[in-house]
Amino acid sequence: MTERLEQDDHFFSAWANSWWDTDSMMNPLKSFNPLRFAYFDPYLEAGWQDVRVLDVGCAGGYTTEFLDNRGAKVTGIDVSAKLIDAAEKHAAESGRAIDYHVGAAESLPFPDATFDAVTCVDVLEHVQSPAAAVREIHRVLKPGGRFFFDTINRTFRSRVMMIWVPERLLGIVPKGAHDFADFITPEEMNTYLDAAGFTAIGAPKGIAIRGQNKDGSLKAKLVSDMSALYLGVARK
């Protein structure tokens, strides 16, 4: 475990204490993982069992626990000490052996070629330097390792679908969660991948959000339209 940061002003830290509550405002984020991995799975041919995975920007642990359920050997890292505390507490309560660290995506505290795969979902649009984060992810991956990501395109549609509707109209995402200027076009993402030494594989996909179910989960599906939220995979 890395040393805790002295200050924790990360935006999502405000929801750390309620992250795993049944009525948590963060619960809709769980809805994305089944869709994400329906897209990711074909690019990890042998499956996730015993694969050493780093989840960058793990927050309170939704994706790390999703990976743990699939048999992966999971490490999670997040810049927020409060969110890591929430993730560790829930993992301990549910008997999971997930290795959590506090740290930034741009400076990962792991040796070169440590992991078989890295996931980084709903994160790159929040970091200070996406290019540096992608370089660090490339560094800690083993040769041939896979990088699985999603992020948000910078378009008029993404402003409507990822900010105006969820934050201002429906109120299902905290106001200020996203900054339109930080969204990343696919062309920019490809530039970061190329500069880091990655090779993009497969055809990128989008996720369309169609509304919200009565239990708070999101109605969403994989689509070919990448004008809002989109996913990709790259190989070292």
Image (spheres, grey):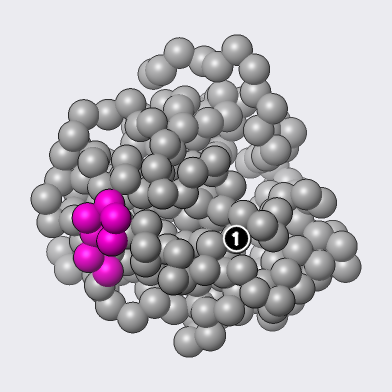
Q: Is residue 145 left or right of residue 5?
A: left
For the N terminus, the quadrant is: top left
Residue at position x 53%, y 85% in the image: 225
Percent of width and height locating residue 61:
51, 41
Q: Is residue 68 left or right of residue 23?
A: left
Q: Residues within 10 Å of mark 1 (few under 14, many from 20)?
A: many
| Image quadrant in which you'd find residue 140 | top left
Percent of width and height locating residue 42:
26, 73
Q: Secondary structure at mark 1?
A: loop
Q: Is residue 224 magenta?
A: no
Of residues 230 and 24, the one nearer the viewer is: 230
Residue hosting label 1: 183
Q: Which residues are magenta?
A: 194-200
Residue at position x 29%, y 55% in the image: 195
Residue at position x 39%, y 77% in the image: 204
Whether residue 197 appears in this view of the structure is: yes
Whether residue 29 appears in this view of the structure is: no
Of residues 53 and 212, the one nearer the viewer is: 53
Percent of width and height locating residue 100:
41, 29
Q: Amino acid at mark 1?
A: Phe
| Image quadrant in which you'd find residue 86 | top right
Q: From what the image shows, is residue 166 above or below residue 108?
A: below
Q: From what the image shows, is residue 6 above or below residue 33?
A: above
